[in-house]
Amino acid sequence: MYYSTVGIDSFREIRINALSYVDKTKFIKLIVERGHPKVSLFTRPRRFGKTLILSMLAEFFDINKKSTELFADLEIAKDQEFCATWMNQYPIINISLKQMNMMDYDQCLYNFSSSISQVCFDNDYLLTSKKVKSIDQNKLQKLYEQTATFGDLGQALYILCRALNSHWGKQVILLLDEYDVPLNSAWQHDYYSKMLNFIRNVFGYAFKGNEYLKFAIIIGCLRISKESIFTGVNNFKCFPINQSQYADMFGFTDQEVDHLLELAHCMHKKQEFKAWYDGYRFGNTSDIYCPWDVVNYLYDLKDNKHCKPQNYWLNSSSNDVIKKIIKFCTFDVKNTLETLLNRGTILCKIVNTTTYENIYNSEINLLNLLYHTGYLTKAKETNCANERYLEVDTELLRIPNAEIADIFVDVVDEWFKYQLETKEHVDLLNSFWSADSQTFTQILSDLLMQTISYYDYHENYYHAFIVGLFSSLKYVVKSNIETGLGRSDIVIYDSQQHPKMGACIEVKRANAYTSLHNDAHKALIQINQNKYDEEFKNKNLQIIHWGISFYKKSCCAISKIIEVKL
């Protein structure tokens, strides 16, 4: 039986309630192997189980807890000698910086102070421990009360490590989640330099020469340049998504998804899961699914075995990153987006370090941003003849699955509207409302050449093209409404400039350039036969019928003026 874990990133809660858990406990042994880096950074896209991984680690190592029952029957429990040596043997600091996603620098510091206060609360025995020096207890008391100085706040993690070490006589394991959120927020809201200095200070004390630190695991989406925030940190190692090591520790493998589908009796939905939520490639490991999507779709299937996949990632993750392409890029990304949306691949040199100031300054930086945040992934091995493909760290990138393609379509629509808003369209509107078919066809064709097409020019693309065109120009647009004897493609009102006019548009996709005129004529006939202008009958409007056919980036528009009187 499958028991859902939607919205739960607490390992303890999942295990206590006997919910369905994908066993990732082999990760525990890997990170404590001899010679493993003291400070390890793992970067993965959002919603790939990173917080749950840290929760698992905290439960396993925390000296304040008894975790034997939580890990019973999991893979790690098979190694009894390892568990006896490591389980519940070390003091833990488990902290997330996700609350520092604020528009204001001072509010970010306040939220960081609140997170530190919670850690002090969880370890309040340190305030009265006879083993902890009074100077540290005084600092901890102020951190707990959120009255610490700016300097002590910057040293907070180091102070906590020192106090925990004094009490337990053991080095501390530091687990840090969402480490890149403060800098991402600061970059978006113009206080990047101040936040960079603060985070550099916090990390410097916590990771650079900290003799009280056993090891640290840091989790985030992007690899911020080491020179920016990890300066001087020795024995530091980043494990990004293009490395094969730990590739199957974040996200679900094909076998793991099969197991969950069997538990939920949903194997009949396997191909939909694969098309919508699979497709990620970490290192050389293919078929990695986004776990957030998998568990959400399984939850919906519990009540309706025939429900369709949805875009769960869009509703859970901030998509500001990709939407800012429209506003901030200093170069033309139209061809790149068009290639990706047509399920093509883009050649790109992978860069595992990021400086926010340069993200939108070049296509390489932009593609790397999209890659590391999960909007793109590595294509499977191919016989690419391009010599650049042979270069070190150069990869072919693609959209991973139908869910992300759906997000890209929304971005394309915004891109199109933005482009239209920056152009003058007096001639287009005049030709449209005067039923000047020749001029309107020419202007529409010119626009097609400037905008982005996708999905092999399907009819719904052209429909969206027309809807987006008039919506962006502040017209009243109704799409696919029931009217007359069927559903009209598009109905448009111009209530301000032309209050006595309305238009019905039927869109067709031609199979060849030579059939454009015939298909446009058929569209006009369809409007008339199905009485798509029925809703105009009692409004005393002059109606224009437009039949528009498209073939790739060519079109033909034919109009007919209809007089309607009461």
Image (cartoon, rainbow, N blue to C red):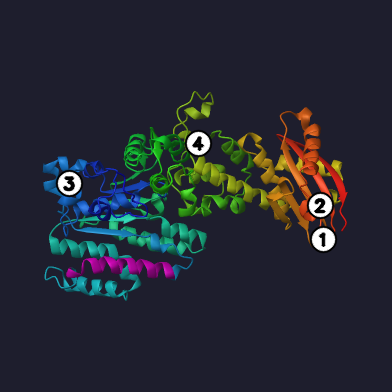
- Label 2 vs 3, first from the N-terminus: 3
Instruction: Give the quarter of the figure containing the N terminus.
Output: top left
- State if disc 1 and disc 2 touch (CB < 8 Å): yes
The residue that label 3 is drawn on is 72
Q: Amino acid at mark 2?
A: Leu
- State if disc 4 and disc 3 touch (CB < 8 Å): no
Residue 26, by quadrant, is top left
Q: Residues within 10 Å of mark 3 (few under 14, many from 20)?
A: few
- Label 3 vs 4, first from the N-terminus: 3
Q: Is residue 209 visible?
A: no
- Label 1 vs 4, first from the N-terminus: 4
Residue stretch in magenta: 107-125
The residue that label 4 is drawn on is 397
- In magenta segment, residue 120: yes
- State if disc 2 and disc 4 touch (CB < 8 Å): no
| Residue 443 locus on image (x, y percent) | 80, 44
In this view, the residue in front, 340 or 227, is 340
The residue that label 2 is drawn on is 429
Using the image, determine if residue 210 lies above or below residue 73: below
In this view, the residue in front, 515 or 377, is 515
- Distance of mark 3 from mark 1, alpha carbons? 73 Å
Instruction: Give the quarter of the figure containing the C terminus.
Output: bottom right
The residue that label 1 is drawn on is 497
- In magenta segment, residue 468: no
